[in-house]
Image: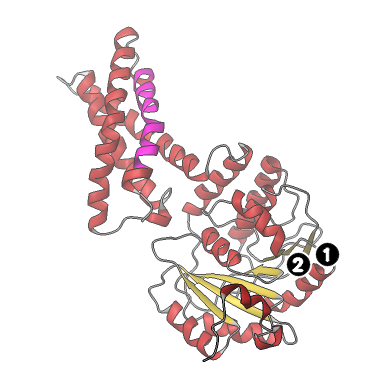
Amino acid sequence: MQEAIRPHDAVAVPFTEARTPPELSIVVPTLNENGNVPLLVLHLGRALEGIRWEVIFVDDDSADGTIATARRLARRDSRVRCLRRIGRRGLAGACIEGMLASSAPAIAVMDADLQHDEKYLPQMLEHFRAGADLVVGTRRTQDGVVTTGLSAVRKWGSRLATNLARRLTGVRLSDPMSGFFLIRQETFEAIAPRLSTQGFKLLLDIVASQPRPLLIEEVPYSFRPRQYGQSKLDGLVVSEYAGLLLAKVSGDLLSTRFLLFMLVGVSGLGAHLLALKGALSLPQVGFDLAQTGAAYLAMTWNFFLNNHLTYRDRRLKGLAILKGLLSFYAVCSVGAVANVGVASWIYGEHPSWWLAGTAGALMGGVFNYVASSTFTWRQR
């Protein structure tokens, strides 16, 4: 009878019995990229000939069969790996999970839409072999001019975002908005606990969170047009980016999600004050009733905006929206009691509707964030 191999004996298995480990892992976050996945694997095979590599697709439970296609490829090619995330959304979080699943000394991140040119990966890997901690595929040349492949609007937006990042965080990359980069595995492991899983700009977060100066190289490349699928960038990304910058300015004392929640709260305050002013203009409507109505209108506003922005990775859909709204009303009603009480007291002492309304709305802000995170958009 053959003796069973004990767990600690695994280290004695000859190295030649296992597949030669990759030098490079390419992490590719996906959401409805079914048409691009096979093409990307084909392009990587051509570009990385002679290099030991693997690609890790991290899929946010796509509805178009992306993960099934990736798994079919993985059954035929051991260089293809797949991670499916359920109940979690977000490009940064997907990249972080994929990078933490890699044991290769070099880890690259690129999009699945074929806009990042895989032919530059060997050049980026050479910089890594020469000692670089981080190699960035930049859409800008050394003189600061955006290379081809970006629309006029995206060039302007990229330039504005880069200037803000430099002024607020001190990052000196020519293109900190890039989603195409290669990093040393141990470097990433040291930074990972400081990173936010929200948003789209992981590179900026990595550079702004570094505990020590990194040796960084940049490789200019040109954006290519998307072939299949739709872009995941939308207007909400701007707010997420603002939240990330503010979090880094605060030294990560305030989380990106909390700052987004408070930004939404500011917009809700505007809705609150407009509703309060309108209600007070009606006959027979006292301040207490007007303040209460304005508070619940602002709650409704904040709920739907938070559902699409602050908690987009936990976004409620279908019947869950109604349940979530009722939950949000319930937990925020405690804050509303303090809201109305403080506002009424201030209005009685100083009959200024805007001062009383603002003080009342701010009173419930922090409580509403904690309560809604715990009950309404709890991690499932």
Examine the image and state in which quarter residue 275 appears.
top left
Category of crowding for the residue at label 1, using alpha-carbon neighbours closer than 10 angstroms: few (below 14), some (14–19), many (at least 20): few
Can you tell which mark lies on residue 68?
Answer: none
The residue positioned farthest toward the front in the image shown: 1
Q: Position of residue 326 (x, y in %)?
A: 23, 44
Q: Report if residue 357 lies within the magenta region.
A: yes
- Could you say which is closer to the camera, residue 241 or residue 109? 109
> In percent of the image, x 51 and y 76: which residue is there?
82
Q: Position of residue 46 (x, y in %)?
A: 68, 87
* SS majority, magenta: helix
- Could you say which is closer to the camera, residue 279 or residue 16? 16
> In percent of the image, x 60 and y 51: which residue is there?
193
Q: Report if residue 227 lies within the magenta region.
A: no
Can you tell which mark lies on residue 220?
Answer: 2
Q: Amino acid at mark 2?
A: Pro
Q: Is residue 126 left or right of residue 279?
A: right
| Marked residue nearer the N-terminal end (2 or 1) | 1
Count of number-bearing discs: 2
Considering only vertical position in the picture, is 106 above or below 72?
Answer: above
Q: Please tell me whether mark 2 sits on a helix, a strand or a loop.
A: strand
Considering only vertical position in the picture, is 195 above or below 254?
Answer: below
| Magenta extent | 355-372
Residue occupied by mark 1: 131
Considering only vertical position in the picture, is 18 above or below 343?
Answer: below
